[in-house]
Image (cartoon, coloured by chain):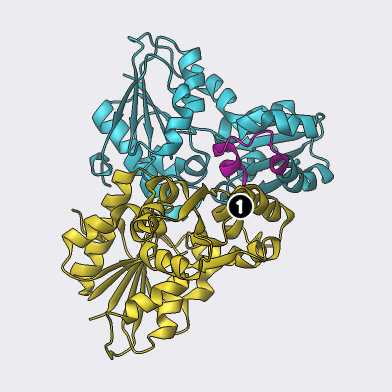
Chain colours: A cyan, B yellow
């Protein structure tokens, strides 16, 4: 019974890689919906439908035992629906990120950055305030970060400019902790830390591991399967995240289970 | 018998608006595939499949008489397939752009900017050299332009920085004409012209009109219908392009005709 992981594209391979490292004996099946990437610019309704289709594919065709939603937009909008729909544990990136942020923040002022979908959903904010009603949460959508990362412009002056433009207003509010609410953002951790060395950064792709540890403790054969709905140019840039022993296969959109 | 127009999203509404203005009596049906936007980051195979699905929807369900492919990525990869498949005229943005550029260039050095898909397809370059083998063509993918336009960052310092970073190398090659090979780029015309006032700019959304004039000359009732596969946040920003008298409707992806 493998762990199933899905993402809107190949960004979630960062999460896949973390899980693979911490659970070397677990069977892993990753689905990247590259044919419809990104999800962050779609409507709530469409994000929920795509998330159901991806999850059903992993559940029905690969009998996954645990479902990891690596995409922040999908975690923000579709998690409750997925939990109602499937009788297996469903783990998103939002809750682990929230718990880690509450752990490390000293002053109770927490920043959240992500796509429009993630920020507009208020999923992080709601979760943070549910657990700690007295804290203050400041959110900011950073729509240029994904294209900048995908272009490999990590150390480019434009990236520094945009880091300051997006994050300074959160820093001005007094945040001591910043949640990276998008699978692409961990690659900007170095730039953000160099501009704001005093801010503690929470990376969801790391903290999700503890959540999985709490419910998954199986020894399997350790196979690694990656399914993509399109072999897009972006995939070629991130191919190295696939790991040596992964079997990769393209599937048609029509193979996803319609709901 | 209406004119059918399709695009990967709402960017093609610039083309729809031009056509609407020049053909007030024509019936127009626009399809924006917002549920899978953008096409420019997908594989050739996927772009062709989506283009066939969108075109079949317009052809079979709306009996369009002429098919206008407003998306540069789709025009670059799918035009020959669509022409083989449908027995109606199929007009893309590439050929009109090529003809206009050859008309205005004095020194035969032409620049082309677009998404990775459009540039990698070499559709503009091939078409230009087919018609004028002695000219020189210089291409550059400008992947940050679409997010910058979608963010409304037209007059932002980062946009000026990226205009110089992308286009200076074409200017250094001596181009006197630049083809804007993406429906979003006309909104950057002002910035590009202010940095490079000596360069003549060819905007495909304008030049496509002459092509349509050459084959379409009907008086219809002048209805305007817009179908979108998702009502995404980006649509709300460009809603004003829809024009007052357009009837807008959301359709499900499953309503597109599968091929």
In the displayed structure, B149 sits above or below A95; it is below
**Near-viewer residue (B176 or A123):** B176
Residue at screen point 45% across, 70% down: B103
Looking at the rendering, in which quadrant would you find the N terminus of chain B? Answer: bottom left
**Near-viewer residue (B141 or B245):** B141
Pinpoint residue B157: horizontal percent, then vertical percent. 74, 55
Residue A134 picture quarter: top right
- Side of A221 relative to B84 (left or right): right
Query: Which region is colored magenta?
Result: A144-159
In the displayed structure, B179 sits above or below B48; it is below
User: In this rendering, does residue A206 appear at all?
Assistant: yes
Residue A199 picture quarter: top right
Residue at screen point 31% across, 31% down: A58
Which chain does tag 1 point to? B
Pinpoint residue A4: horizontal percent, then vertical percent. 37, 27
Residue A89 picture quarter: top left
Based on the picture, tell me whether residue A150 belongs to the magenta stretch. yes
In the displayed structure, A93 sits above or below B256; it is above
- Residue with the mark numbered 1: B167
Residue at screen point 28% across, 43% down: A253
User: In this rendering, does residue A42 appear at all?
Assistant: no
Marker count (numbered): 1
Based on the picture, tell me whether residue A5 belongs to the magenta stretch. no
In the displayed structure, A219 sits above or below A95; it is above
Pinpoint residue A180: horizontal percent, then vertical percent. 64, 35
Residue at screen point 71% across, 45% down: A162
**Near-viewer residue (A196 or B51):** B51
- Side of B50 relative to B152 (left or right): left
Mark 1 surroundings within 10 Å by alpha-carbon count, few (fewer than 14), some (14 through 19), many (20 or more): many
């Amino acid at each position: 019974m493998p762990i199933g992981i899905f993402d809107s594209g190949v960004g979630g391979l960062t999460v896949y890689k973390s899980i693979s490292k911490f659970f070397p004996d677990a069977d892993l099946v990753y689905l990247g919906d590259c044919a419809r990437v990104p999800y962050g610019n779609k409507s709530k309704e469409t994000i929920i439908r795509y998330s159901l289709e991806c999850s059903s594919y992993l559940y029905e065709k690969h009998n996954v035992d645990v479902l990891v939603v690596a995409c922040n937009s999908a975690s923000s909008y579709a998690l409750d629906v997925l939990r109602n729909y499937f009788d297996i544990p469903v783990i998103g990136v939002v809750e682990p990120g929230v718990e880690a942020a509450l752990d490390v923040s000293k002053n109770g002022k927490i920043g959240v950055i992500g796509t429009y979908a993630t920020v507009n959903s208020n999923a992080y904010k709601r979760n943070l305030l549910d657990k700690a009603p007295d804290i203050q949460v400041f959110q900011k959508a950073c729509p240029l970060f994904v294209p900048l990362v995908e272009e490999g412009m990590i150390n480019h002056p434009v990236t520094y400019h945009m880091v300051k433009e997006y994050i300074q207003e959160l820093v001005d509010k007094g945040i001591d902790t910043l949640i990276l609410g998008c699978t692409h953002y961990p690659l900007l951790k170095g730039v953000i830390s160099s501009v704001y060395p005093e801010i503690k950064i929470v990376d969801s792709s790391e903290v999700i591991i503890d959540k999985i540890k709490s419910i998954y403790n199986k020894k399997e054969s350790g196979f690694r399967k990656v399914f993509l709905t399109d072999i897009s140019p972006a995939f070629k840039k991130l191919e190295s995240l696939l790991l040596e022993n992964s079997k990769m296969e393209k599937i048609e959109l029509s193979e996803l289970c319609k709901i």
